[in-house]
Image (spheres, helix red, strand yellow):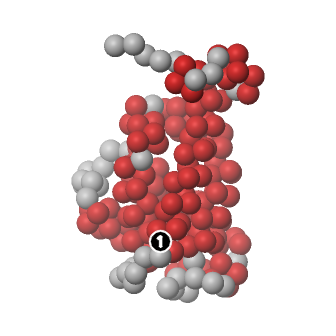
Amino acid sequence: MVRLTPARRAGVSRTTIYRRFSNKDELIAAVIERENVVLFAEIADELKHAGPQSNYYVEAFTHAILKFRRHRVLNRMMTDEPALVIELAGQHYGAAIIRMAEALRVIFPAGFAERIGEQAVNELADTILRYAAMVLLLPSAQPLESADEIRAFATQHFLPSLPAALRAVPAG
């Protein structure tokens, strides 16, 4: 089996790739960023148009985990290169919070983000990212494969950790 380099796969020369990216990790970070932007936008759009749910936060978390696991590039990175994913998350975590907060503003009903305030939106973005990383990267004593298993986890662990401003004001 012949493995293609990133430059060959993209149909450009190595020089072209390395004019923009100084090393392989930078290239990988850019690919992850691009894929995350698309994925977050898809999740936000799907949740914005979803019907009524028993618990909005649990359903949104569950949907995001399942969608992430079906994403060919991002899921493969998580399963094949977890150490690199954690390293890159450390380097780009601020940008991930901003991106998640932007997606939340799309998902929330009109005026909700303003009611709870920017700090609560950013805290929720941080909470979502931390719990998603936990589910996607760490082993679990209980299975977390099906939607029902993820919902049970989210209800037991994720909901109690929501920022106080969100526990006081329902999203839907």
Answer left or right for 117 relative to 9: right
Q: Which residue is mark 1?
A: 47
Identity of the residue furthest to the front in this view: 11
Answer left or right for 123 relative to 157: right
Identity of the residue furthest to the top in this view: 2
> Label 1's element?
helix
Task: Give percent across and percent down for residue 82.
Answer: 45, 35
At 61% across and 44% down in the image, what residue appears? 33
User: In the figure, residue 2 lies in which quadrant?
Assistant: top left
Answer left or right for 76 relative to 119: left
User: In the figure, residue 159 lies in which quadrant?
Assistant: bottom left
Q: Nearer the viewer, residue 26 or 3?
A: 3
Task: Give percent across and percent down for residue 109.
Answer: 58, 82
Task: Give percent across and percent down for residue 18.
Answer: 70, 20
Please say whether residue 134 is visible from this viewpoint.
Answer: no
Q: Where is 29 relative to 167, above or below?
A: above
Q: Where is 160 relative to 111, above or below?
A: above
User: In the figure, residue 20 lies in which quadrant?
Assistant: top right
Q: Where is 145 relative to 48, above or below?
A: above
Amino acid tagged 1: Leu
At 70% across and 16% down in the image, what residue appears? 15
Q: Nearer the viewer, residue 38 or 54?
A: 38
At 65% across and 43% down in the image, what residue appears? 92
